[in-house]
């Protein structure tokens, strides 16, 4: 029941944000576990952010995370915040909940990140994805649509 309530609340927040002038971005990343295992992760990211003021953006983020250690697929739902330090560098944090689509792995999700703008609509992203008691170091690219 908690999972359904969280998903409905998240969707209502995202739908409310659609009324704003926002930016939709998609991306992909690759990484590895930080809890002593030697497994890899591959992920896809989607975020929708709108400017609160010139240096801050907020919105929602989701994606898919494929892990090789547990052969699982994870679906994070998060609220996202970004601080734009200058025209090329952004610091961000996603916080929410992860739903395991194939195995156990539900839990609190947080993702601090560093982004560097490479060109028009393309950014390099480095991040740590903490899920429950485990985590992953990631690097990837984001593309503005």
Image: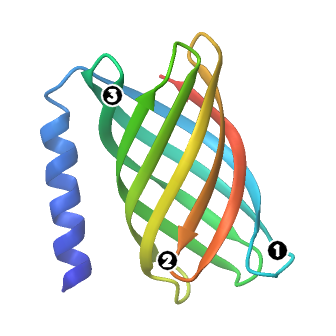
Instruction: From the image, tell me which residue sits under label 2.
Output: 101
Instruction: From the image, tell me which residue sits under label 1.
Output: 39
Among numbered discs 2 and 1, the one appearing first in the sequence: 1
Gap between marks 1 and 3, in whole Å? Answer: 35 Å
- Vertical position of residue 55 compared to residue 103: above or below: above
- Residue 121 placement (x, y as % from top left): 56, 16
Gap between marks 2 and 1, in whole Å? Answer: 19 Å
Image quarter hosting the N terminus:
bottom left
Instruction: From the image, tell me which residue sits under label 3.
Output: 56
Between 12 and 94, the one nearer to me in the picture? 94
Name the element at disc 2.
loop
Residue at point 33% right, 30% down?
57
Residue at point 36% right, 36% down?
48
- Vertical position of residue 27 compared to residue 45: above or below: above
- Residue 143 placement (x, y as % from top left): 57, 27
Q: Are marks 2 and 3 in contact (CB under 8 Å)?
A: no
Residue at point 54% right, 46% down?
45
Among numbered discs 1 and 3, the one appearing first in the sequence: 1
Q: Are marks 2 and 1 in contact (CB under 8 Å)?
A: no
């Amino acid at each position: 029941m908690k999972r359904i309530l969280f998903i409905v609340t998240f969707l209502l927040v995202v739908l409310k944000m659609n009324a704003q002038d926002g930016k939709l971005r998609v991306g992909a990343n690759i990484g590895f576990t930080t809890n002593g295992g030697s497994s890899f992760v591959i992920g896809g990211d989607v975020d929708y952010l709108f400017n609160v003021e010139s240096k801050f953006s907020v919105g929602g983020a989701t994606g898919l995370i494929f892990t090789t250690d547990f052969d699982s697929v994870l679906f994070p739902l998060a609220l996202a915040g970004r601080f734009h330090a200058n025209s090329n560098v952004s610091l961000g944090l996603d916080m929410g909940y992860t739903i395991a689509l194939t195995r156990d792995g539900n839990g609190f999700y947080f993702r601090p990140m560093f982004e560097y703008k490479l060109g028009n609509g393309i950014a390099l992203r480095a991040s740590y994805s903490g899920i429950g008691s485990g985590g992953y170091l990631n690097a990837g690219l984001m593309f503005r649509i």
